[in-house]
């Protein structure tokens, strides 16, 4: 579960950078 949350956080960070 933590790994899934980490992927979402990383995706959100990349998306906000754009």
Image: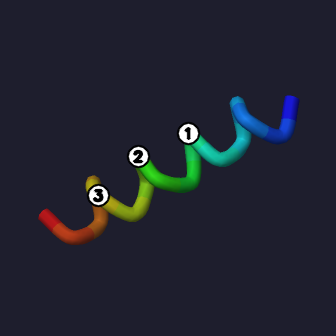
- The residue located at (83%, 40%) in the rendering is 2
- The residue located at (70%, 30%) in the rendering is 4
Q: Eyeballing the image, is 13 above or below 4?
A: below
- The residue located at (56%, 39%) in the rendering is 7
Looking at the image, do the residues carrying marks 1 and 3 touch, with CB atoms under 8 Å apart? no
Mark 3, secondary structure of its residue: helix
Q: Eyeballing the image, is 18 above or below 9?
A: below
Mark 1, secondary structure of its residue: helix
In the orientation shown, which residue stands out farthest toward the bottom? Answer: 17
Residue 6, image x and y in percent? 65, 47
How many angstroms separate mark 3 from mark 2 (CA)? 5 Å
Residue 12, image x and y in percent? 43, 54
Residue, disc 3:
14
Question: In the picture provided, is 14 more to the left or to the right than 18?
Answer: right
In the orientation shown, which residue stands out farthest toward the left? Answer: 18
Task: Give the camera-side residue of 4 and 18.
Answer: 4
Q: Eyeballing the image, is 14 above or below 1?
A: below
Q: Which mark is residue 16?
A: none
Looking at the image, do the residues carrying marks 3 and 2 touch, with CB atoms under 8 Å apart? yes
How crowded is the residue under tag 1: few (<14 C-alpha within 10 Å), some, or many (20+)? few
How crowded is the residue under tag 2: few (<14 C-alpha within 10 Å), some, or many (20+)? few
Residue, disc 1:
7
Question: Which of the marked residues, 1 or 3, is nearer the chain's N terminus?
Answer: 1
Looking at the image, do the residues carrying marks 1 and 2 touch, with CB atoms under 8 Å apart? yes
Where does the N terminus fall, quadrant-wise? top right
User: Based on the displayed image, in which of its 4 quarters is residue 13 positioned?
Assistant: bottom left
How many angstroms separate mark 1 from mark 2 (CA)? 6 Å
Question: In the picture provided, is 15 more to the left or to the right than 3?
Answer: left
Residue, disc 2:
11
Residue 15, image x and y in percent? 27, 54
Question: In the picture provided, is 1 more to the left or to the right than 9?
Answer: right
């Amino acid at each position: 579960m933590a790994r899934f949350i980490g992927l979402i956080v990383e995706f959100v960070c990349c998306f906000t950078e754009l």
